[in-house]
Amino acid sequence: MRDITLGQFIAGNSILHHCDPRTKIVIMIVYVAMIFLIKSIPVFLLPLAFLILSLLLSHIPVSYILRSLKPIRLLLIFMFVLNLFFTRGEKIIFDLGFWSLTWEAVMQSVFITIRIVLLVTGASMLTLTTSPIALTDGIERLLSPLKVFRFPSHELAMMMTIALRFIPTLIEESDKIMKAQMSRGADFESGNLLVRVKSMVPVLVPLFVSSFRKADELATAMESRCYHGGEGRTRLHSLQFTRLDLFAALLTAGFFAATLILYIVL
Amino acid sequence: MPITVNDLSYQYTDAAHSTTALSHVTFTIEEGSFFAIAGHTGSGKTTLVQHLNGLIPCTEGTITVDGHSLADKKERSIARALVGMVFQYPEYQLFAETVFDDIAFGPKNLKLPENDVKERVLKSMELVGLDPEQFREKSPFELSGGEKRRAALAGVLAMQPKYLVLDEPMAGLDPIGRQSILALLERLRSEFGTTIIMISHSMEDIARHATMLLVLDHGQIAYLDRPEIVFEHAEELFRLGLSVPQATYLGMLLKQKGFDVPKSANNAEALARWLKEKIDHA
Ligand SMILES: Nc1ncnc2c1ncn2[C@@H]1O[C@H](COP(=O)(O)OP(=O)(O)OP(=O)(O)O)[C@@H](O)[C@H]1O
Ligand SMILES: [Mg+2]
C-alpha cells in the first residue's frame, strides 16, 4: 500500500516546484487537451517531449514516474487486450476464423496505451512537484470566479486539502490495526475472496471509528481556532505569478500550437 | 527456552529516503523475566518489539522464540502464538459488537472448541478486572477509556501467550489504572510464569518491577543490565533523554554533597532506611 504515488509530493527546489500552482494546473489541462487532440501515433512525440522536458526540469528521479504506472499496470494490459479483440479493421495480420487480428486493432491498442501512460505520468508530474496545499490553493483560486454563482470553491478546496492530508494517516493507521489483529491470529492472506473480505472487518471497523473520531477532533480544533469558512479569510502565502510562469505558459502554448497545426494538417 | 535476538538491524525505506531504526542489536530475554525497554522517542523500541512476533520480518539478523526461527514461515506462526503483543493505545483495535466477541477473536482464530473459547474469555475478563456479568454483552465502544484498554488487553491475554509484549501499556492512564495494569503483569508472571516484555518511559515502574532493562539509543543498545545497575549511569541516561528514579536521583545528589551513600541504597525503601538511620544517629 505504501507505493501509492498518486497524490504524493516530493519537496524540491526545482523550477517546476517554484511555478505557481495555477499555472501548473492550467498547463495540465492544456496537456490533457493536447493528448486528446492527437490522432496518429508519431504526434505523441510532442507531449512525450514536453513530459521529458518537465521531468528534466523537475529533478525528479525517473523511477518515481515509472512507479506511478505500477498500480495501473493491470488496467493497461486490460485496455490493450480489449482493444486488440474488439477493434474492427480491414488489414488482416492473421485470421482465426471466429476472430482475426487486424493492423488497425494493433494500432488502436498501442494508441490507447500511450494515451493512458502519458495522462497518468503527466498527472503524477503535477502532484509530485506541487504540495497538496499549493494544489488545493491553486484550484480554489482558479474556481473563485464561480463564487458569483454561490459555488463553494473555498469549502471544496479545504475538503480536498484535508482528504489529501489524511491519506498517509489512514495508511499508517490501517497498517497498525492490521498488525494488531495479526497478533491475535487474524489471517488476511489465505482463503477465497469471501473469506478475505470477511477477514477485513476487524480492520475496517476500528479504521472507521478512528476516522470519525479524527474528523470530530479536527472540526473542534478548527472551530476553536475560529475557522468559519472562506469568507473574509486572508492568506499567509498569497499566490503570485512570476516570469517563470510566463515562460512556462509560452512554452506550453508553443507545444499546443504545434499539436493543433498537426491536427489540422494531418 | 528464551527469546534470542542476534545482530538485528532494520531500516525503514520509503519513497524518498531510508531511516535506520535498529542497528546490530543482540540480546536474550530469559523465560520468566520482566524485561523492560526504554529509550528516547524514535530510538526504535516499537520497531524492536514488533520484530519479536514477526510482524516486521527480519531483514538482517536472526530471532528465535523458544528455538523457533522467525525467518521460517511455519515456525513463525508457532512463534506468533507464543508471543502476545499489546500495542500502544490497544483500545483502538476493538471492533466486535460485544466485548465478549472481541476478546474471543484471538482464541477463535486459534480454532479452539467453543467451550474453551468461552472459558478463556471469561478467565481473561476476570484477570483484567472486567466483571463478565456486567460487561460481556456490552458494545466495546460504549466503555470508558480505561475499560476499553482492559478489554483490549483481555483480547491478547485470551491467546494465553507465553511471552507478553506491551508497548507503553500505561500511556494516558490515571495512577490507579497504571497500578492495576502493573499488578496484573506481576500476577501473570507469578501465577502463569508469563514472561513480560514492556516498553515504558516510567523509570519508577521499571525500577520497581523489571528484572532486566534494555536502553536503546538511536537504534543501538546503550545499556543492557539489571535496572539498578543501569541507573548508576545517571549522567549518561540524562544525556540520552531519559531519567532515573527519584530515589536514585536523591541518592546521587546526596553523594555529590559529600554524603557516603552505600551502593545497596539503590531503591526508595533502602535509601529511606539509610536516611532514617543517619537522622537517628545525628
Ligand atoms: N512506518 C515507518 N516508516 C518510516 N519510518 C518509520 C516508521 N516507523 C518508525 N519509523 C522511524 O524509525 C525510527 C524508530 O521508530 P520507533 O517507532 O521504533 O521508535 P520508538 O522508540 O517506538 O519511539 P516512541 O517512543 O516515540 O514510540 C524513528 O526514527 C521513526 O521515525
Ligand atoms: Mg513507539
Image: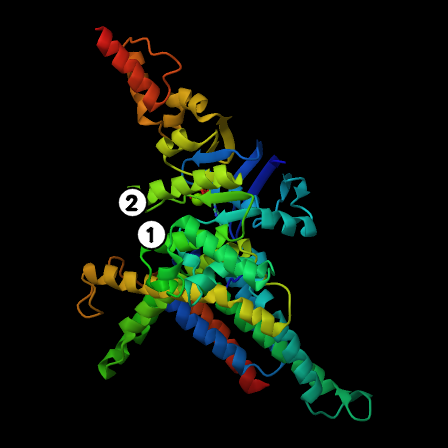
Q: Residues within 10 Å of mark 1 (few under 14, many from 20)?
A: some
The color scheme shown is rainbow
Nearest the camera: B224 or A138? B224
Q: Is mark 1 within 8 Å of ligand 2?
A: no
Report x, y in % for residue B128. Answer: 41, 49
| Residue B60 visible (yes or no) | yes
Question: Which residue is more in the foreground, B137 or A258?
Answer: B137
Rendered location of residue A42, percent (x, y): 64, 76
Residue marked by disc 2: B174
User: Residue, x 39% and y 30% (percent of image)?
Assistant: B208
Is residue A186 among what the camera can see?
no
**Chain hosting mark 2:** B
Q: Read off the chain for label 1.
A: B
Q: Residue at x 19, y 59 (%)?
A: A224
Residue type, numbered disc 1 = Gly
Mark sitting earlier along the chain (2/1): 1
Name the residue nearer the viewer: B254 or A126.
B254
Where disc 2 sits, the SS reads loop
Q: Do the residues under discs 2 and 1 have CB atoms within 8 angstroms?
A: yes
Q: Nearer the viewer, residue B214 or A53?
A: B214
The reply to whether label 2 and label 1 mark residues of one chain is yes
Which residue carries the number 1 mark?
B146
Q: Position of residue A212 (x, y in %)?
A: 35, 66
Residue type, numbered disc 2:
Asp
A23 with respect to A56 (left or right): left
Gap between marks 2 and 1, in whole Å?
9 Å
Left or right relative to B41: residue B196: right
Q: In the figure, A79 relative to A245: above or below? A: below
Q: Secondary structure at mark 1?
A: helix
Location of residue B172 with respect to A58 vertically, above or below = above
